[in-house]
Image (cartoon, rainbow, N blue to C red):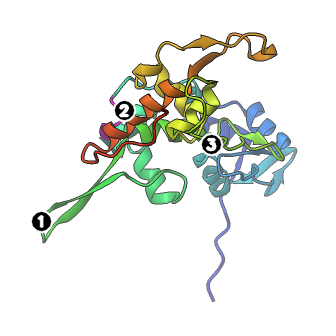
Amino acid sequence: MTSRREPRLADAAEIAAEQGLTPARISGLYTERAENAAGVPFPEIADMRGRARLWDHAQVTEWFAHRTPARLQEHTPPSRDPQELLNAADASRFLGYKNSNQVTTFVRDHPGYFPDPDVVEELGTTENPYRRQLWRVQTLLDWMATRPGRGRRAGAKAVPPLPDVPVDGDPDELLGATQAAALLGYKSVGSFSSSLSQGNLPLLKTPDALAENAGRQNGRRRWTRRHILEQAAQRSKKQNPAVSAHPPTAP
């Protein structure tokens, strides 16, 4: 008869030392029932040692694997061609991780958390084959923009999806960032704003107008549908250079 292995237990101080936080912050994550990027709340207490709380070390480590540190929230990636392909190590550094193996760890140990590679190259020899996975810079930017931050309270509302914006509307109608992001095919306003700030949308660098008499929206940038669709056509052509067909443009 085999004996069941007891889980390793760790207190707030030990967990804090491993994760670069304070014991008070670890206790706060538990008290707040903070959720990680996968929507999983901080693990329940496994035991007590006097007045000290103890958690299952493996469960806590797994929880933190899906949590974005504050340092990464503030990280601004370097400006690069959105269609440039990066391997796992370069992608890790581009995203701000100190560990160059972080993306490899995500893909290997946490399926579904990180986007699939855009290109997989079969390399090596028949006797010793290996695969090189590559991600486009834009794929990484999109993931950064939609990746949850330091954890959110249970019950927090999810970010609403972008609206459906018709391409055949008034070409001179002024549209905001949310509508522009939708027409350009981004997954979120954040990824659109990130790409714009890096100079990847040159036709929209200068807005056509600033919102007026719009309450809290005053001063927000606006672009005509015509210019947004011109940028969409240019972006599509760059992503698919072999395809001559362009998306619909305003008349």
The residue that appears at 87% across and 44% down in the rendered structure is 51
Q: Magenta span has 120?
A: no
| Residue 190 in view here | yes
Is residue 76 shown above or below 3? above
Residue 247, picture quadrant = top left
Q: Quadrant of the N terminus?
A: bottom right
Q: Secondary structure at mark 1?
A: loop
Dot 1, crowdedness within 10 Å: few (<14), some or many (≥20)? few
Residue drawn at (56%, 42%) of the image: 187
The Cα atoms of the two marked residues, 1 and 3, are separated by 38 Å
Percent coordinates x, y for residue 42 in the rendering: 75, 49
Quadrant of residue 150 within the rendered picture: top right
Q: Main secondary structure of the magenta part?
A: loop
Q: Nearer the viewer, residue 160 or 61?
A: 160
Q: Which of the numbered marks, if any, corresponds to residue 67?
A: 3
Contact flag, marks 2 and 1 (Cβ < 8 Å): no
Say which element carries label 3: loop
Residue 236 has which mark? none
Q: Which residue is mark 1?
A: 125
> In this orientation, which residue lies closer to the viewer: 164 or 61?
164
The single residue placed furthest to the right in the displayed view is 51
Give the mark nearest the N terminus, 1 or 3: 3
| Residue 74, image quadrant | top right
Q: How many other residues sit within 10 Å of disc 2, few (<14), some (14-19) or many (≥20)?
A: some
The amino acid at mark 1 is: Thr
Q: Give percent across and percent down for residue 84.
A: 30, 37
Disc number for residue 234: 2
Residue mark closest to the camera, 2 vs 1:
2
